[in-house]
Amino acid sequence: MNQSRDQYGKQAIQLLLTNMSGGPLNVAEARLASALFQGDIVWKPSGGSLELPPNQPKSVPAGLPAPDCRGQSTGQQPIAHVKYSEPGNAVLRELAPDAADPFGVLERNNSELCLAAETAAVADIALDRRLEVAPDGRTAVVRLFITPKQTNGAGSGAAGKPMTVESIDGTTLIAEPSDGPWPRDVRIVQGTPRSELRLRIRPARCDAHAIAEDKVGTLLPLHVSVGGHEGLLKVAAGSALRARIYDFVTAACARG
């Protein structure tokens, strides 16, 4: 298992298949069961099967189901099932190979998705689609809206606990100006009015590949704590804001 930068923002991972049989095989399905998720992680080829030559690894994308956030499944080995057939034989066989996760992809995604669910129980956090560019074109302002959920009167559970945005990181595309640091230790409590954080930004880099190869530069990382848990919450810019950030960084970098 692995995860590319492009898949990171789409809640998907890569399954790496390697055929060690010595002859070609046609793979019809790869399924991975992990206690970290509520359902199986499944890949099926769009054409019915994928030809897998011997000793030639191929990576295939698979979407992640909803996470299991009960905290009882850390360290359990995922179980894999692969359906395949041999050339000239339509009968499917099933194999249960070892499923290695050397980079901790499943645990990391489970942790981040569970933290996102906990924060969503306290407040909705989103970036405004507008971008306010300074007259000199060298900085701009993005708005982060935080809308606390209404209290339910229960007084218990994650939804009844406050949340703190401890700090905000820059990305491969944008950073905070030295004369305009971003807010820290912002406390969010259910039932309070919506707040707006105005974040002045500048280009983080101006090399030729900054925008052309960008995959995660418009995912704003927030360090949050909620319900006794701490972690990183990525807030994605929508398509309109993403395009405006790209235009701003291009124009600002052209000014030198």
Image (cartoon, grey):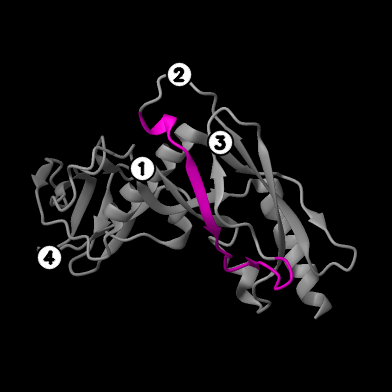
Q: Is residue 162 left or right of residue 249?
A: left
Q: Quadrant of residue 20?
A: bottom left
Q: Earlier in the sequence, mark 3 or mark 4?
A: 4
How far apart marks 2 and 4 lie (CA) works out to 59 Å
| Alpha carbons under labels 3 and 4: distance apart | 48 Å
Question: 231 or 139, which is in the foreground?
Answer: 231
- The residues colored magenta run 157-180
Horizontally, residue 37 falls left or right of residue 161, namely left
Residue 114 is tagged as 1
> What residue is pinned by disc 2?
153
List the residue tagged with mark 4.
20
Judge whether residue 46 can be spotted in this image. no
Disc 4 marks which amino acid?
A: Met
Task: Please state, as top left, top right, bottom left or bottom right, where the N terminus lies in the image.
Answer: bottom left
Q: Which mark is residue 141?
A: none
For disc 3, the marked residue is 124
Secondary structure of the residue carrying tag 2 is: loop
